[in-house]
Amino acid sequence: MPQEWWERFFSGLWLDVQRELRADRTPAEADFIEQVLRLRPGAAVLDVPCGEGRLTLELAARGYQMTGVDITEAVLAEARQKAAGRGLQIAWHRRDMRDLPWKEAFAGAFCVWTSFGYFDDAGNEAFLRAVSAALRPGARFLLEFQALAETLLPRFQERSWGPVGDVLVLEERRYDHARSRVDVEWTFVRGGRIEKKSSSIRVYTYRELCELLARVGFAEFEAYGSLEGEPFRLGQRLYLVAAKTAG
Ligand SMILES: C[S@@+](CC[C@H](N)C(=O)[O-])C[C@H]1O[C@@H](n2cnc3c(N)ncnc32)[C@H](O)[C@@H]1O
């Protein structure tokens, strides 16, 4: 059976690129998450998908009761090892983000680094519905999304390349307006090692995203364009915060 792109992508040289790209941002992102989710000390918080747990670990170290969900065993193994090394108690779950088992269990949740839009429209909605169900009424959710139409399209580049640490990364992008998806062919090169991968992400407009979130029980949208809390503007990445409605 053919695998989905997201079952193949998160491995190999990408993992080194991922560590290099976000490590410096992690403490500032954790500060932002604490603030916009209005977390009380020791609150139960869901990180989905959590990857190697860079934010799960950081927030657990700040005293929150963290749960991390991801589908890729290799990244979860790394996360578990880091947690053990730092003596942190974290609940790690290997599962599909569209299928979360919790009901009103969390005081906050977040999905960061464009970890949304991987599926078809029904799948993307199923994920947001599962997050909504997992949150207590009034709890807040942060979605960081760079495949927003207002972010991506004003400065769309068909091709870009450059070094990330010691890996050379080439991205060849195609925007398919009929499917509203950005399809990317990636090439990673380190020394003589070359890896090719593909990704495909649904591009939503801001309004589509809010309508989708409203359909699954969110309201009170706040749109930020940076970790400093600037209001979102065209071309910036989006940090969208929403609260789960009471009813
Ligand atoms: C770009 S990484 C971001 C990880 C983390 N949010 C961070 O900021 O470091 C995206 C993650 O999504 C996970 N993922 C992809 N498809 C998934 C699925 N269907 N269910 C759960 N996790 C998934 C991948 O394994 C990967 O760790």
Image (tube, helix red, strand yellow):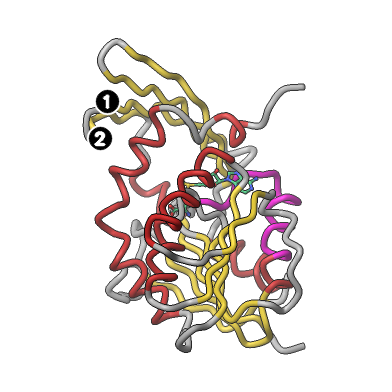
With 1 as the anchor, is 204 left or right in this view? left
Q: Is residue 126 magenta?
A: yes
Relative to 138, is 33 above or below? Answer: above
* Cβ atoms under marks 2 and 1 closer than 8 Å: yes
State which quarter of the image contains the C terminus: bottom right
Place residue 189 in its image quadrant.
Answer: top left
Q: Which residue lies furthest to the top in this view?
A: 192
Q: Label 2 is placed on what type of residue? A: Val
Q: Does the magenta stretch include residue 164?
A: no
- Circle 1 sits on which residue? 168
- Circle 2 sits on which residue? 164
Give, as a single range, the part of the protein colored magenta. 115-130
The spot of residue 158 in percent (x, y) is: 38, 30
Of the pair 92 and 237, the residue shown nearer to us? 92
Q: How many neighbours does mark 2 have within 10 angstroms: few (below 14), some (14-19), or many (20 or more)?
A: some
Of the pair 82 and 192, the residue shown nearer to us? 82
Place residue 100 in its image quadrant.
Answer: bottom right
Q: Distance between the residues labelled 2 and 1?
A: 6 Å
Q: Is residue 139 visible?
A: yes
Relative to 158, is 205 above or below? Answer: below
The spot of residue 64 in percent (x, y) is: 47, 77
What residue is shown at x 66% (from left), y 53% (from top)? Answer: 97
State which quarter of the image contains the N terminus: top right
With 223 as the anchor, is 225 left or right in this view? left
SS at mark 2 in the image:
strand
What residue is shown at x 53% (from left), y 75% (from top)? Answer: 65
The spot of residue 180 in percent (x, y) is: 59, 43
Place residue 164 in its image quadrant.
Answer: top left
